[in-house]
Image: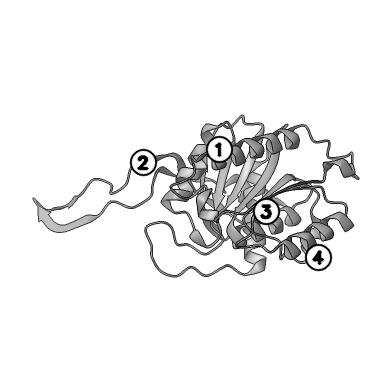
Amino acid sequence: MLRWITALALAVVMIGPAYAHKAPVHTGRTRGYRKRAAPSCHAFKGEFVQLATKSGRRFEAYQVGSRSAAIGILLLPGARGLTEPVLAWADRLGARGYRVLAVNLYGRNRANRSRRAHRLSKSRARAEELTAIHLLRAPGRKIVTYGWGHTGSLQSLEASAADPADVSGTVLYGGGVSAKVSVVRRIQSLVFLVAFRSQTSLAALQAFEGRLRVYGKPLTVHYYNVAPAAVSPLGPHDHSALARQIGAMMRTFFGQVQVLCRRCAPYESALFNYRN
């Protein structure tokens, strides 16, 4: 226990203002020192931090947003890692009043690295998810896990299942319907799913909805016959009319999470919504 408390106390080490790319270094020397160019990308609003799991293993995350926010978001971008679009997405959520912690569960690579990302082992990913959730905890704050794409959405469900006592909302944006029953059974949060016909068949979607219903998990679904890129929070169309509409529905969901009574389960069946 003491080791875990010590790890949490030492978990956050500021790395300074966040840049998507490191500053390139010139090999030439002037008067005995190396000349550095200006950063290749603009600074973002948040900062990179080093966190430590219970076992002492360190990993990097990006945090942004008000420390007094009523909603804390664990942002899980999947295999994309902490790229420029992901950092910009986190900044937008932070600017809307949320406390955001973006975590890459695909190893150490960040936006400036192009090597192929490899997903962490389940035990290590779970340890990092728990550490991130514990960092987001604050008096009166509700925590939401928010995943993008198939892998990010699965990570969102897995993070919610890893700490069901602390997570009040689970957002799946474009995936997650293949989650195992063992994961679904453990979550104790409201679930918000944005699905796309080109990626998720109606049969798969209904099967997922059925699994959540069986175990009494409240689900809101929005199913679209458009390409995911048309409303992706990581793409050039994130300000389209449809993307703004989805953003408004997401804020409504966050409002429901904020007033959720965690000790009022089983949830009312009226919380199940299906909108096509």
Asked if the residues shown at circle 3 and circle 1 are in contact, with their CB atoms under 8 angstroms apart, the answer is no
SS category of the residue bearing label 2: strand
Q: Nearer the viewer, residue 264 or 218?
A: 218
Query: Residue 129 placed where, x, y %?
Result: 64, 55
Element at label 1: helix
Which residue is denoted by mark 2 in the rendering? 43
Mark 4 against mark 2, which lies toward the viewer?
Answer: 4
Amino acid type assigned to the residue bearing label 4 in the image: Val
210 vs 245, left or right, is right
| Residue denoted by label 3 | 130
Camera-side mark, 4 or 1: 1
Label 1 neighbourhood size at 10 Å, few (<14), some (14-19), many (20+)?
some
Residue shown at the point (89%, 58%) measured from the top left = 214
Q: Nearer the viewer, mark 3 or mark 4?
A: 4
Q: Residue tagged by mark 4?
A: 181
State how far apart marks 2 and 3 are (Cα): 28 Å
Choose the circle earlier in sequence order: 2 or 3.
Answer: 2
Of callouts 3 and 4, the N-terminal one: 3
Q: Nearer the viewer, mark 2 or mark 3?
A: 2
Of mark 4 and mark 1, the one earlier in the sequence is 4
Q: Mark number for residue 244?
A: 1
Amino acid found under the numbered disc labelled 1: Arg
Which badge, 2 or 1, is on the more N-terminal residue?
A: 2
Inter-mark Cα distance, 3 to 4 = 20 Å
